[in-house]
Image: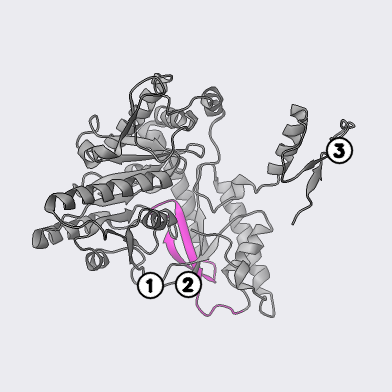
């Protein structure tokens, strides 16, 4: 346990009783704003360097002028649409823009909402799937007590939370060495009349690979013809929703497939906005059951709301619209293409380094991952490499793959806007130096398995 209090360490004598402050209790007296600022500032200054964080998908830099918009709007409560009607209009515009980008048949009539992030958007998408299934089953006079949902074993943890929190049986299609993403055969083996939907990933968090949404949709079309089962798809496009429309426009994964009923995306990942915004859009308005929408009047107007949270800031939604105006389709293409080029440059270089075998090369998301070649060494592993890079400031996660491949450990690098070729070459040089040091060891590094995994999905 840390000490129970901390010293203020000021440049001038503190007032009586202000020599120290309790760590886990609110102090009896306040302090000067400059003193409070300095203490908090110095604490967070010890965090890792965002430029060297290759683990996160989350945006860590925006243009300074975007910061001005942020400062002008962080005091607006997004839920209070009666007080801030222009901000509410901006949110609607963003939904329409995304619906159009993802080929909704009725982008100006469909429905969507902003969220605190893609995780909340996933929860809302899952709730809509469950409620639509319940409504349909009740009309058929069938029980609704055993719903299930199908997704890959490599799914992001939010979907496991959804199944747990909302009493839905999770059914996993395990990835294997021959099938690194969920495939149609595995989906068909898992679904039945109690399946509320299939969740496909446009960008698997573990590896950066796209799952074959169109092939899974086609397999479910054929299943419906044979059996009458009509099973919808939700696409978790947390990262890929802002990549595929620009870098892989020919890829069919979105509302062009009638079976895809909803899509979520993270605005604060490749949407290029500071943390705190996600989006979910339904293909058509009727795909979101009306009884999930609440209407409240106690903020001054009769406003519909569908969210897990209520009050939240407007700034990130406004910044999302700023990005849409600032970049346009051409700008988003250029930004994402630079990230992809850096990812492919690094993955190609890493592939030539003796110890490594690639899992993904950055051709889908600007993300690549690799494993240690089998039999290369018994003296060190990827966890040792991750720790070695951490001493140089780099945060590069090492972690095991999900069940059926849990004996395989991989490393993953996420390239985001702002990570330049200069930084890429610095990382490559530091990586090779760390590998060279580890290769020079004449005996195995001791391990404590409790501390190997420092990154969790």
Task: Tell me the residue at 32%/47% (across/down).
Answer: 127
- Of 126 and 326, nearer the camera is 126
Left or right: 82 with respect to 423? left
Real-space CA distance between mark 2 and mark 3, rounded to the nearest whole angstrom = 52 Å
Would you name the residue on which mark 2 appears?
Answer: 408
The answer to whether residue 249 shows anywhere in this view is no
Residue at 45%, 39% in the rendered image: 116
Q: Residues within 10 Å of mark 3 (few under 14, many from 20)?
A: few
- Quarter-of-image position of residue 445: bottom right
Sequence-earlier tag: 1 or 2? 1
Instruction: Check disc 3 and report the residue beneath it.
Output: 19
Q: Quadrant of the N terminus?
A: bottom right
Determine whether label 2 and label 3 are within 8 Å by CB: no
Q: Secondary structure at mark 1?
A: loop
Q: Are marks 1 and 2 in contact (CB under 8 Å)?
A: yes
Q: Earlier in the sequence, mark 2 or mark 3?
A: 3
Query: In the drawing, does residue 383 fall left or right of residue 21?
Result: left
The residue that disc 1 covers is 177
Pick the residue in front: 241 or 109: 109
Indicate the colouring scheme.
one colour
Instruction: Give the distance between the C-alpha atoms of the residues marked 1 and 2, in whole angstroms.
Output: 9 Å
| Residue 272, image x, y percentages | 47, 38
Q: Which one is in front, 254 or 231?
A: 231
Q: Quadrant of residue 245?
A: top left
């Amino acid at each position: 346990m840390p000490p129970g209090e901390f010293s203020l360490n000021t440049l001038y004598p503190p007032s009586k009783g202000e020599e120290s402050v309790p760590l886990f209790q609110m102090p009896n007296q306040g302090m000067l704003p400059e003193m409070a600022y300095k203490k908090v500032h110095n604490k967070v200054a010890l965090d890792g360097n965002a430029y060297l964080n290759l683990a996160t998908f989350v945006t860590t830099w925006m243009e300074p002028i975007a910061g001005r918009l942020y400062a002008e709007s962080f005091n607006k409560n997004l839920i209070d649409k009666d007080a801030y009607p222009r901000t509410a209009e901006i949110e609607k515009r963003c939904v329409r823009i995304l619906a159009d980008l993802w080929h909704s048949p009725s982008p100006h009539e469909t429905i969507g909402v902003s969220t605190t992030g893609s995780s909340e958007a996933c929860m809302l998408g899952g709730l809509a799937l469950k409620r639509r299934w319940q409504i349909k089953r009740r009309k058929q006079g069938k029980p609704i007590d055993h719903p299930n949902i199908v997704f890959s074993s490599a799914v992001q943890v939010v979907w496991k939370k959804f199944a747990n929190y909302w009493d839905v049986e999770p059914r996993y299609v395990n990835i294997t060495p021959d099938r690194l993403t969920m495939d149609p055969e595995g989906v068909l083996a898992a679904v039945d009349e109690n399946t509320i939907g299939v969740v496909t990933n446009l960008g698997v968090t573990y590896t950066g690979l796209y799952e074959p949404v169109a092939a899974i949709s086609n397999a479910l079309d054929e299943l419906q013809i044979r059996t009458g089962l009509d099973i919808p798809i939700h696409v978790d496009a947390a990262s890929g929703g802002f990549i595929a429309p620009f870098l892989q426009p020919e890829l069919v994964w979105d509302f062009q497939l009638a079976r895809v009923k909803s899509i979520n995306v993270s605005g604060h990942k490749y949407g290029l906005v500071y943390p705190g915004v996600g989006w979910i859009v339904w293909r058509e308005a009727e795909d979101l059951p009306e009884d999930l929408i609440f209407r409240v009047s106690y903020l001054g107007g009769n406003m519909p709301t569908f969210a897990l949270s209520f009050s939240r800031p407007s700034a990130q939604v406004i910044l999302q619209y700023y990005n849409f105006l600032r970049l346009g389709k051409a700008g988003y293409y250029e930004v994402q293409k630079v990230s992809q080029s850096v990812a492919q440059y690094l993955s190609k270089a890493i592939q030539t380094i003796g110890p490594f075998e690639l899992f993904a090369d950055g051709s889908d998301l600007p993300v690549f991952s690799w494993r240690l070649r089998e039999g290369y060494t018994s003296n060190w592993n990827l966890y040792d490499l991750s720790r070695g890079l951490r001493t140089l400031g780099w945060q590069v996660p090492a972690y095991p793959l999900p069940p059926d491949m849990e004996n395989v450990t991989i490393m993953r690098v996420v390239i985001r806007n702002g990570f330049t070729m200069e930084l890429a070459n610095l990382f490559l040089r530091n990586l090779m130096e760390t590998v060279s040091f580890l290769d020079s060891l004449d005996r195995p590094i001791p391990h404590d398995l409790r501390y190997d995994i420092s990154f969790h999905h």
